[in-house]
Structures are given as C-alpha cells and as structure tokens.
Image: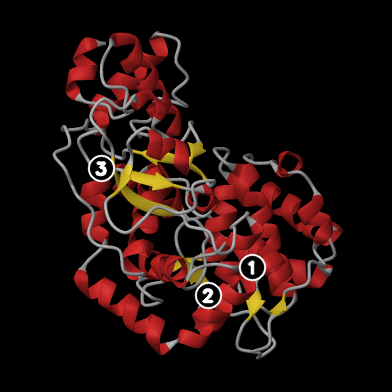
Amino acid sequence: MRLTVIAAAFATLLAVPATAQSGCGGSWSSFIAGLRSEAISNGVPASTADRFFSQLRQDQNVLRSDRAQGFFQRPFVDFSQRLISQSRLNRARQLRQERASLFQAAERNYGVSPGIMLAFLAFETDFGAFQGDVNTANALATLAHDCRRPEIFRPQILAFAELYHRGELDPATTTGAWAGEIGMVQMLPRDILNLGVDGDGDGHVNLQRSMPDAVLSGAALLRHHGWRPNQPWMHEVAIPAGLDLSRTGLRTQMSVSDWERLGVRPRHGSLPSGNLSASVILPEGHRGPAFMIFDNFRVLFDWNQSFTYVATAAYFATRIEGAPVYTTGNAETGLDQNQMRRLQQALQARGFDVGGIDGILGAGTRAAVQDVQQQLGMPADGWPTPALLNRL
C-alpha cells in the first residue's frame, strides 16, 4: 500500500498565523474579492481563482445550523446510549475484520488503534453512509464571512481553492457537513491539504469514496496532533467513597500509581503502567460513570471540542476493542439549557470565567462548577445539578 501525503506546497498559507486571516463581514462581493486576491497571492492561478470564487454563494441554512447545536448538550449517558447501538458495534467489529490490513496499516504507520478510527467512522458518517449534503465551498465561505469564527474558516476556504487548483476537489460537486467537513471521517480542507494520505495508491486523496484514504488520513491527523503510539486513551474505573472529588476532572493529572494509592480501581481488567499520567473524569458526577483518561484522550479534542462527544467516541473505541458496557450508576439529574444559562450567569456574577453564557456545559463551566462546589462544601465533581443552582 503506497502512502503519499499531499505535499505542503501551500506552505505560505499554512505558515501565516490564523489571526492574520480573520477578515470578515462587509459586502459579500468585496469579501469574495478579498479571498480571491489572497488565494492568488498564495499561488493559485488567477484564472483558476476566478472560476472557483465566482461559484460561491452564501448559505443561510449553514448559519442557522451553526447557531443551533443542541445535540451535543445531552448528558453523557443519554448521548452515548443514543449513538452506540448493538448493530453499530457489530458493524464496527465486522469492518475491523474485513479491512484488517487497512487498520493494521493505520496502527503501524501512525500508532492509532483500530477502535479509535472505527469510532470516528461510525459517529461521523455511519461508516461512510451519510457524509452530508451541504455544498462545502459555500458553507466554508459563508462561515468565513460570518464574523463569529472567521479565523477558523477563512484558511479552510483558501485551502479548498488550492485543492481545486490541484484537481482534488470541485466546488460545484463537493458536499459534506454544514461546517465544511468532508468525507468518511469528516476532515476540513486545510487538514486534507496538509495531511491527506493516498491510501489506495491512485494518485489522489479522496476521503469521500476511498476508505483507505479516509482511515489513513484520519490517523495521520491524530498523529499530527500528538497521538502517542501504543498508549491507552481510556479505562473505566470505580472511585472509592471519600475520594477528594476536587482532584477529578481534566485539570488534574497524576500517575496511575498515585490514583491507585487513592483507591481508584479498574472496573475490568487492569490499569496501564503505573508511571503513565492520567486524570479521572466523571461525565455525570460522582454517582455516574467514571473513567481514567490518558494523554491520547486529550488529543481527541483536536477532532471535536465537545467533551460529551469525545468521551463517547473514546468509550465506544474501547467497546470495539472488547471492553464491557460501562456502569451507569445513579447520576443526579442535570440542568436543561435554560437552567444552565442561569447557572452560568450566577457563576459569572461570582467572578468565575465560564467561557460565555451559552447554556453549554463546556470545559470552562465544568471547572467553575467544581470550584464553586468546593467553596460551598458540596461534592466537587463538576456536575451541575438543580441543587447547586438553588444554592447559587
């Protein structure tokens, strides 16, 4: 199997800090003209840039989707049970056997375990079956023009223009997710340009129709972000009564041996090497599931920034590789979106940085919840409940 990484000839763009590419807003025609000029300055021929940028149109549905991402706000247990079915698990294990040489190549060349790549294949596109039907170029241009996150999307539409110049993507026919991700593992154009792998040896990187290209490109992306070969990412654990819960969460790392000395035990099998650095996460508080997570778990946030999504994908990967179903426990009821906004407002009024009043339990809100729980003498597990909201 020939592995050809797309050359980074678009290095001028890739080397420019994102903050230097954050122009947004204004009239659509002026915005597109600015993109065209920047693409030409980065090496795209003027005639190619004319053909590419003349096709682009704003898509208001993309903006509506960007403002309404409610699915990732579900609690971990609910979210994971919705995404992980027995049929999906069976399909993942079957595909691992059918394409054994492909997943072995991903592990051999990039150190990424089969379970991880299969989990992303499953969750992103149901193993390639549903890759999205939104015009990718229009979506990226729309999000780059919108001034909410232009530093993310402006480089992506410029990378798409370079891929069009190379004959890899066509703006008229390339479709994907509303946020511009393409193919079976949903990668953005800049990552395809810089890290895409020709896994089937046909001279092109096609993440939409070639599973070898998709799997190996995804593995290359994770390795680029710091994935550590032959190391774990997650293991279900049981925490002892009386554990100092303020030590749990992503902010605290200790060695596996230190956690074991505090009474943390594996729910199944055995924990990895005692010298590894690890954290203990409680997605729904101390009465819900508990997991020990490692450095590779943190790498997954470079794929998706949702804590719930990452925890679910990491857990599903362990299931694909033989782990049993987690213990759900008896977690306390969480907060709905309106309650979460009220909580964030109360935390912000107390001086905590929650990262914005958006009703989403992100990393900033979890950290603030844990700190205020400790101040109030409540179990400091980072899980917001109606009881905490009432106290505040």
Q: Which residue is mark 3?
A: 75
Q: Is residue 216 left or right of residue 19?
A: left
Amino acid beneath label 1: Ile
Asked whether disc 1 touches disc 3, contact meaning CB atoms under 8 Å apart, the reply is no
Looking at this view, name the residue that lies furthest to the left: 330
Which quadrant of the structure image shows residue 163? bottom right
Q: Is residue 278 left or right of residue 280?
A: right
The circle drawn on residue 327 is none
Q: Which residue is mark 2?
A: 215
Q: Which residue is mark 1?
A: 192
Foreground tag (1 vs 3): 3
Which secondary structure lies at badge 2?
Answer: helix
Dot 2 or dot 1: first in sequence order is 1
Dot 1 or dot 3: first in sequence order is 3
Dot 2 or dot 3: first in sequence order is 3
Which secondary structure lies at badge 1?
Answer: helix
Task: Identify the residue shown where x is 28% and y is 56%.
Answer: 268
